[in-house]
């Protein structure tokens, strides 16, 4: 990780207590200037204990705000070296019960915002792009099915970008990190306040992974030799995951 000291990283969904928050802190510990992006930056500021974690408020469903952020990063830090696309959202409903607006919200954040971040970051002369998928981007379990569809799209975007960059003779690297269940606020948000007890029951049912486990995977990918591209990291808790009831 020595070669990344004083280089610039952007991490989306970098709030305290989240996967993005853990990744942002690990990058700072490794000497990187890290832009922690979130809609509510007060949760990023909880982690901003050094001058190298910079909170940035941005609504990722608004392309103009994303574009303004990259202009700001270029003006203040000269550009981006590492992009971690971590932010995502889910709705705990079967596809047959989802509203169109809910589908659009998932697509806007999970696919379109992620793709725009990749595009702008690559144009900013990145050396690596990390996209945050999930095991649901590789297989469908019968729940969170439309969320899984957006993560399958992330898998396609990641591979498509690799091929486009290879055609250009670029050495930019694309890594997709796909964790299984990680204990965060994610399931609570997905179920909603009325069914928060279901999220608690699922987290209590097996030993879930922690945000730090995911951050370790990011550091592993970044630590690879310059001539090595870590394309996909898929990992899950040891215990099988029961279905939500």
Image (cartoon, grey):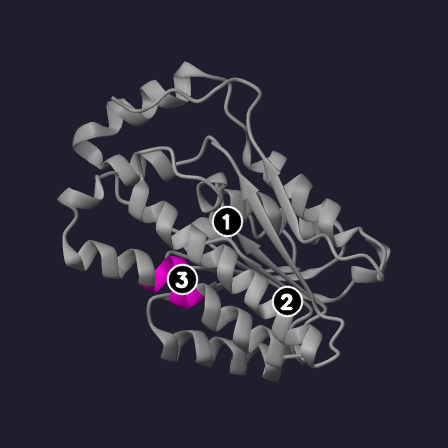
Q: Is residue 38 above or below residue 187?
A: below
Q: Residues within 10 Å of mark 1 (few under 14, many from 20)?
A: many
Q: In the image, is 198 to the left or to the right of 229?
A: left
Choose the circle earlier in sequence order: 1 or 3.
Answer: 3
Label 2, label 1: how far apart the Cα atoms are: 15 Å
The one nearer the camera, 99 or 163, is: 163
**Residue 44, percent from left and from top:** 48, 52
Residue at (30%, 34%) from the top-left corner?
143
* 245 sits to left or right of 184: left
Local SS, label 1: loop
> Badge 1 is on which residue?
133
- Say which residue appears at 44% left-offset and 41% top-offset: 136
Q: Is residue 245 visible?
A: yes
In the rendered image, residue 224 lying in the magenta stretch gets the answer no
Instruction: Give how far across and how far down residue 94 sits, in percent.
Output: 21, 39
Number of numbered markers: 3
* The disc label shown at residue 111, or none: 3
The Cα atoms of the two marked residues, 1 and 3, are separated by: 10 Å
Residue 85 in the image: state x and y as whole percent: 52, 58
Relative depth, front residue between 43 and 96: 96
Asked if the residue under mark 3 is in contact with the one under mark 1, i.e. CB atoms within 8 Å, the reply is: no
- From mark 2 to mark 3, how far is it between C-alphas? 16 Å
Q: Which residue is drawn at 26% across and 59% down?
A: 105
Say which residue label 2 marks: 162
Relative to 125, 138 lies left or right: left
Residue 93 in picture, x, y percent from top left: 21, 39
**Image vertical order of residue 14 relative to residue 120, above or below:** above
Front position among marks 2 and 3: 2
Chain-order first, disc 2 or disc 1: 1
- What span is colored magenta in the figure? 108-113
Chief SS of the magenta region? helix
């Amino acid at each position: 990780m020595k070669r990344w000291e004083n280089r610039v990283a952007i991490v989306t969904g970098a709030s305290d207590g989240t996967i993005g928050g853990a990744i942002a802190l690990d990058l700072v510990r490794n000497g990187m200037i890290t832009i922690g992006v979130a809609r509510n930056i007060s949760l990023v500021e909880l982690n901003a204990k050094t001058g190298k974690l910079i909170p940035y408020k941005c609504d990722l469903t608004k392309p103009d705000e994303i574009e303004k952020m990259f202009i700001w990063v270029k003006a203040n830090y000269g550009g981006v070296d590492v992009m971690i696309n971590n932010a995502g959202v889910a709705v705990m409903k079967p596809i047959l019960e989802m509203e169109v607006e809910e589908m659009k919200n998932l697509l806007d954040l999970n696919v379109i915002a992620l793709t725009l971040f990749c595009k702008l970051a690559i144009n900013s002369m990145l050396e690596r792009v990390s996209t945050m998928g999930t095991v649901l981007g590789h297989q469908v379990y019968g729940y969170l099915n439309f969320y899984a569809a957006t993560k399958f799209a992330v898998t396609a975007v990641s591979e498509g970008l690799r091929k486009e960059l290879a055609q250009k003779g670029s050495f930019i690297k694309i890594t997709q990190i796909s964790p299984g269940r990680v204990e965060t606020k994610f399931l609570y948000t997905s179920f909603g306040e009325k069914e928060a007890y279901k999220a608690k029951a699922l987290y209590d049912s097996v030993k879930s992974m922690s945000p730090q486990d995911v951050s370790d995977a990011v550091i592993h990918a970044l630590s690879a030799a310059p001539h090595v591209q870590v394309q996909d990291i898929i990992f899950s808790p040891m215990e099988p995951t029961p279905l939500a009831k």
